[in-house]
Amino acid sequence: MIRPICGAILLAVLQMTGCAPTLPNNTPIQEARWLAQNWTADERYWYHHASQGTSTLPVPYDWFIALEQPTLSIFGAPGLISDSDYLRRFGFIPSPKSRAKEAVDPVAYGYAVDEGGRTYGSVASYDETAFYGNPDGLPVGFARTETRDLNTGEKHRDGIGFTCAACHTGHLEYQGVSLRIDGAPAMTNLGKFREVVGLALAYTRYVPGRFDRFAERVLGKEHSKQEKESLFEALKTLIADGKAFQALTKDVAEGDVEEGFARLDALNRIANQVFFTNLLEAKEEGFDATANLESNNAPVAYPHIWDASWFKWVQYDASIMQPMVRNAGEALGVAARVNMHQPGESLYRSDVEVQEIYDMEQLLAGDNPFSAETGFKGLMAPDWPEDLLGEIDPERQKRGQALYEKFCQGCHLPSVDDPSGAFWSHKRWTDPNEANERYLDLKAIPVTKIGTDPAQADVLASRMVKVPTFLDIKRSDIGRESGEDIVTEMDFARALAVVVEKTTSRWYDDNGVAPADRQRMNGNRPNKVRPTASYKARPLDGIWATAPFLHNGSVPNLWALLSPVEERPAKFCLGSRQYDPKHVGYSTECIAGAFELDTDLAGNRNVGHEFTNATGRGGKFGRELTDQERWDLIEYLKSL
């Protein structure tokens, strides 16, 4: 294998295509370890690969498995995109082909030998018969999706998509050990991955000999000439459609802020997918979706998701109340197919797997925390692994606890495991509802007070979208006031809430789900949204595993977060999975293929949530801490 090269020979065959991006090299691993978080190995494996109905990648499943890496080789064919070691370079986490004990390599995959792992609550229930599994050994978060004709319901060729595990599963490395953490932020670069998939299609189309190998993998060795010609025409059409879409979005894309590793502009991408891409074909109905397209200029770090099922407002920015709306909305945002462009009987029919989404949420939530022994009984925050990352100093921890109570507890609450039970008796827990469930009504702090970069908050506070009349969105649907007149322009948050509700209601109708079961699957909470520019001050259990920090990932570690803005790095790199247990975050070394985050750029600002002696600026939450105080507070935070 030789390095990807660019030059006259390559340009002659690839024309408008280019070279694959540089990726970080994998570091050697002697041990893989999933931390104990109250899930059995089987529950974890199902969660990693059960489909939400998404078709995130623009190719059929069998095409993806057959695509070669977009590199050139003078010695035989290059490897496949689906190769586990190759995908690991984008930050994806390797996963086995099955959970059978004989098929699982504990060094490579880290699964427990036994089926234990659950300490609290009951084992989760989900439908194993509807689970494809992971027969091709794709990474955590990849799922095979059964797609259907949205008009007839007939099955199409299977697609391939991401589950929430793709973005909310952590992966850090230290001294040859790979720690895998469910519910933690991913260290992936989805931008480079999308680029590579597009290049792989172009290489398959233009590089001599590559399509022949692709056709044999997709069609089998005994395929006919007609089958091969049909496949080639389908490939050309897909590439042409991709170029047309790129041309359509080119001007707006010039305003994008690079997301890089560990970040994604989730809200703008969801809005563009649902209200631009999904409505492009509505031109036949006289609707032009181009007004709904915006730049992806508000990147955020992936939030950690343990505990979140029991928050009153389940979205990290305190904007969405109902778990089903949040989760099904995420599925639509990562390209679950839905009919929003053609009025008639099939309107709002989709590939969204509502039952699986509900089962995933139940696995995350666990049993009622106020039933039997008080405490969270679903996905638990990870404990600091002292045997690997170092023992916690008890004296520093004690001093740090006093600092936490003085500076942090007023917003972030007492520790979940506080022996006094103060967290569970706190006045922020709501009264029980009809399902006897209580939720944690966390303090929502306006972005003007917390002082962080406003780009993401502005999306909810100001972004508007237009919709065609046949989507049948009424004034009463968006919660502004009563009235049955049709609304064709509204804020993005309410528009998404309505579209998701209509999509899930269509699934409930098609599957004969009773009203009481709908209420249960919706999380026993109404479809309320709160499009305000604010962030929740959530509990800090497991905070050590959630770097980079602030909502946009602009601060690399806890030491920098507890420092004045002037002492935070103005530029640093993301892409290395090497962990820094002293400063508590990832290594910021600018290795080959890493992403350099420039905090001078709008959307990347590292201001706010500051302990400083400076006056006259927003986002100050306390006086400047001494070096010893910072180390002491970090020691306590590691223990949460």
Image (spheres, grey):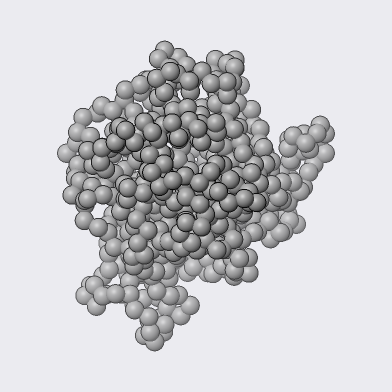
- Tally of numbered tags: 0
Direction bottom: furthest residue: 8
* Quarter location, residue 523: top right
In this rendering, is residue 342 above or below 393? below
Look at 38% across and 39% down and name the residue there: 632
- Could you tell me residue 24's position as x and y percent? 33, 63
Pinpoint residue 505: horizontal percent, then vertical percent. Answer: 62, 32
**In front here: 210 or 39?**
39
Quarter assignment of residue 371: top left
Image quadrant for the C terminus? top left
431 displayed left or right of 381: right
Q: Is residue 91 above or below residue 203?
A: above
From where the camera sits, is residue 449 visible? yes
Can residue 356 be seen here? The reply is no
**Residue 309 screen position, x and y as percent:** 50, 30
In the picture as drawn, the residue positioned furthest to the top comes out as: 372
- Determine whether, in the image, residue 162 is placed left or right of residue 565: left
Residue 192 percent location from the top left of the image:
43, 62
Left or right: where does residue 130 sit relative to residue 30? Answer: right
Q: Residue at x 32, y 33 (%)?
A: 395
The quarter holding residue 496 reads top right
Question: Camera-side residue: 538 or 268?
Answer: 538
Q: What residue is rendered at 40% in x and 14% in y?
A: 373
Q: Residue at x 58, y 51 (%)?
A: 614
Quadrant containing the N terminus in the rendered view: bottom left
The answer to whether 291 is drawn above or below residue 109 in the figure is below
